[in-house]
Image: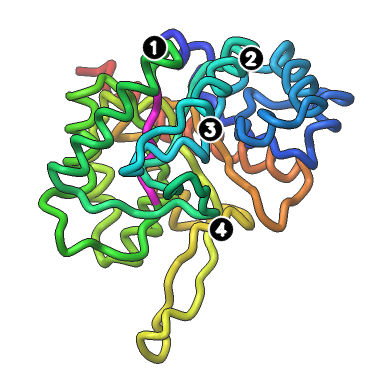
Amino acid sequence: MDAERNRLDGKAGVGLRLPHLEEVVSRAPAAAWLEAHPENFLANPHARELLLDVAAHYPVSLHTVGLSIGSADGVDREHLARLRRLCDDVDPVLVSGHLAWSTHRGLYLNDLLPLPYDEETLGIVAVHLDQVQQALGRPYLVENPASYVRFAASTMSEVQFLAELVDRTGCRLLCDVSNAYVSGANLGYDAYAYIDAFPADAVAELHLGGFTPEPDGGGPGEELLIDTHAGRIAAPVWALYAHALRRFGARPTLIEWDNRLSTFAALHAEAEHADGVAAGVLGEIVPHAAAR
């Protein structure tokens, strides 16, 4: 995993979405690395050919949205086999997905649904992670979710649950800084304390994305933050990102922008801003560490 991290050099990359695919192939715009959702390419031969062309010129990571490692029904082995074939062709630097479930009795739900954090769920997810990593022949990064509800049945915190998954399976973690901010605002906890408790040694990637405030319905002025990936990253998330960098050090960072999609140049500008934040933070840290 250190080799993959070094290959990306701690730089910020851009989420590659289908509307930008032909532009990236034909114009080769500046980008340190790109992340694709494999489900957009598994059943689309033309898009798959273009992705392979992209992978010949850029480092590419794959971020799954359909593996559903939290489903009690188990991982779809056919889907997993298709993903393995795509990994063999693309040779991604990282492969990641969500701590969530999205399938039930063979039906795929268009959402990433939450899990209670207890021993039963931990056992289920750990078994599925073992299956995924063995099938792919590589580590799998698990992403912390954006949360809107808390389960009364949970017996451990989210970071404790993630740390246990790392210990049991050897998986790595994708810390979505925006999700930490959104969840903290929605559930009433300190996002900075969440980052401080996050298993730092397991973090192989960071995510940043936009959110949208929506009325909560609980009372006048109350609102939920929804992880929409529908715009620029908010100022308080940039501040939390700087804190995460101080905690984790340099990590590859991905700009997610999926809805109300802007130009590729606008996404790349967000990546450049992330690199600027990282340069400032690491500039604070390195001389201080060297002086010890």
x, y percentage for residue 164?
A: 17, 32
Residue 164 horizontal side relative to residue 18, left or right? left
Q: Which residue is drawn at 25% across and 18% down?
A: 291
Q: Residue at x 87, y 26 (%)?
A: 27
x, y percentage for residue 51?
A: 73, 23
Q: Which amino acid does label 3 sit on?
A: His
Question: Which residue carries the number 2 mark?
Answer: 90
Instruction: Mark 3: give few (<14), some (14-19) or many (20+) Cα within 10 Å.
Output: many
Q: What residue type is labelled 2?
A: Val
In the figure, 140 relative to 91: above or below?
below
Q: Nearer the viewer, residue 106 or 24?
A: 106
Q: Which of 173 and 191 is in front in this view?
A: 173
**Residues shaded magenta:** 140-145
Earlier in the chain: of badge 4 and badge 1, it is: 1
Look at the numbered disc 4 and give the secondary structure of its residue: loop
Q: Which of 235 and 74 is in front in this view?
A: 74
Q: What residue type is labelled 4?
A: Thr
Earlier in the chain: of badge 1 and badge 2, it is: 1
Question: Which residue carries the number 1 mark?
Answer: 2
Residues under labels 4 and 1: Cα distance? 31 Å
Outermost residue, right direction? Answer: 26
Q: Residue 228 carries which label?
A: 4
Earlier in the chain: of badge 3 and badge 1, it is: 1
Question: Which residue carries the number 3 mark?
Answer: 63
Of marks 4 and 2, the one in the foreground = 2
Earlier in the chain: of badge 3 and badge 2, it is: 3
Instruction: Mark 1: give few (<14), some (14-19) or many (20+) Cα within 10 Å.
Output: few
Residues under labels 3 and 1: Cα distance? 19 Å
Look at the numbered disc 3 and give the secondary structure of its residue: strand
For the N terminus, the quadrant is top left
In the figure, 206 relative to 150: above or below?
above
